[in-house]
Image (cartoon, grey):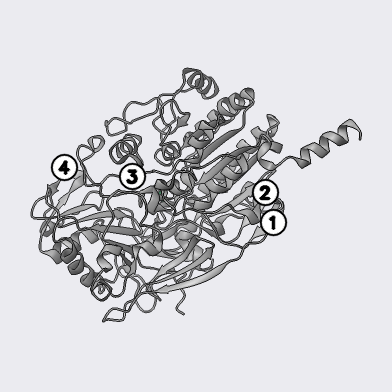
Amino acid sequence: MKRLALAAFLASALPAAAQPHNVIIFVADGLRYGSVTPDIAPTMSRIKSEGVDFANSHAIYPTLTTANASAIATGHYLGDTGDYANVLYTGFPLVALQGSNVPFLENDAVLQEMKAHFADGYMGPLPLLCAAQRAGFSAAAIGKVGPAAIQMIDCLSGAIEIDDVTAKAKNADGSASGAITLDPDISKAIQAATGAASAPATELPNRPQQNWFVAATDMALLPAFQAKGKPFALLFWSRDPDATQHAQADSLGSLTPGINGPTAKAAIANADSDLAAILDTLKKLGLDKTTDVFVTADHGFSTIAKAVPDAKGDLPPAHFPQGFVAIDVSIWLGAKLFDPDAGYQELDLASGDHPARGNGIIGASADAPMAVVAANGGTDFIYTPGADGRAHAKAIFERLLDAPYVGALFVNDELLKGDGAKDFAGALPMSALRLIGAANVPEPSIVIGFRSFEAKGCTLGAELCAVEIADTSLQTGQGMHGSPSRADTRNFMAAIGPDFKAKFTDNAPVGNADIAPTLAHILGIDLGANNPSAGVLTGRVIAEALAGGKKVTVSRKVLSALPAKNGVKTVLDEQLVGRAAYFDAAGIPGRVVGVKDK
Ligand SMILES: [Zn+2]
């Protein structure tokens, strides 16, 4: 056998894990599957057609950023990560937030305080990037503050974790940022590459900031990894199109074009050109043939409505102020409302006060809550701590059954014991959403997914035309996510590289919890199969999309709640591959986009 042929034979005979391949996860925050078109997003479109097109993609519900970041990081569902939403009730006051116990998690100081407080009860499963680092590979997370740090939450000390607050001791509001101190050589390389030690402020579209992240990646991180000669795992989190889709004002007060207008398109193009620049650098450095690139989005997106449309599909004037759930719960329980984001100040509803961020503590005093509302855009959580928690949950639930903004209702499995199935008829158990697992962060009693519908006159199909009620300061016509509609669960996903099939459309369901197991398989590293205390709610290796991989068996399931007296019942449409579950949509039939009434 000739020398060259022998080498080729040996190379092809080696198992995939023995080859020094690298992985990049590129997250385009809030990118909808249907919004990726060749004119706006040529690079992502090319990856879809030349690599693997995940045509049956899924975000994890609630369709929120840090929740999906925790699933992308670890390959576990939210019951195991404890990162159930962007805003949680923690039951303890956070120093990083002047004592609030309802933190917004996109904050490095908050994330580190959560980890220190709950230890393995929050983000217990080992993140892929930390597993890669432990295995001696190079690893880095770069991009949007919050979801970037979650990728390395177990190994932040000395990690290459770069985000909005890198080299800034303070957040914009003056609080401590919790920025990770970078290795001086990496800092110097970034400064040389970008001309600045820290990222510029965010803009719409977020070009200057993301250009800084891209330059740091292309001119500092990737060359350093190449020089080291070890395999690497890198995650890049693009804030666009999310931030721009939220804040765009292309049709303030009206539903079209909403998030399908020119400003949102410019943000998609921004994320796409960032990905293009990183792929170009891989090529220049000779890393393109040995690097797998997995592109995903944490969640889909919808246009906001602050009112429920009438029978003709027309929208009455806006009447859901920020914090409408907290306000309603306070009225229903006949108790005071305190704002955890304003020093627990008591709000005067009669004079039109509403919670600064939608969150509320309801009770006789702020330190003995009957109920706590954590506002999360398209979904709100209601907690009922305290001895009478069950009675408070029941009283709130009965009113929610008649609330026009409700799209889907889930209750904690604890409440369903005994007479619970009758008392909470209309709701599905939270465990059906894989929200109950190994984590020990306080669990909500009730999860409300808000109502959604298709914008009248929109012709782009149900997913792109979706509009949702949202608990937010943003207005009708702007953008939000978090709901259990197919519009919000339908994220963009595609992959390309030596370990993936080429020109392959994967019609099997895949989701954000599958990325870490799949890439760990490619890298040949252990994600903690030997650590059962991290929980068993895991995604799967997407074998059918890997070179030589076989088709998987898919089943479909519809879970239906016992109907309440008024007929309200929540339905959950899901697909299953083995133990991995994929939620298409959930809700009361007719009230949530994508829910099929069987
Ligand atoms: Zn968002």
Which residue is under mark 2?
A: 500
Pointer 2 with pointer 1, Cβ within 8 A: yes
Instruction: Identify the amino acid type marked 4.
Output: Gly
Give how far apart the Cα atoms at labels 2 and 1 are. 9 Å
Picture residue at 35% right of the left edge, 57% below the top: 436
Callout 3 touching callout 1 (CB < 8 Å)? no
In the picture shown, does residue 415 fall above or below 436?
A: below
Q: How many marks?
A: 4
Tag 1 secondary structure: strand
From this viewpoint, is residue 46 visible? yes
* Side (left or right) of 401 relative to 286: left
Q: Are marks 3 and 4 in contact (CB under 8 Å)?
A: no
- Around disc 2, counting alpha carbons within 10 Å, would you say few (fewer than 14), some (14 to 19), or many (20 or more)? many
Q: Which-is-in-front pick, marks 3 and 1? A: 3
Relative depth, front residue between 246 and 275: 275
Q: Which residue is mark 3?
A: 121
Which quadrant, please, contains the N terminus? top right
Which mark is on residue 343? 4
Quadrant housing residue 165: top left
Residue 273 at x, y percent in the picture: 59, 41
| 2 or 1: mark nearer the eye | 2
Judging by the rendered image, the residue that carries numbered circle 1 is: 504
Three-letter code for the amino acid on which mark 2 is drawn = Phe
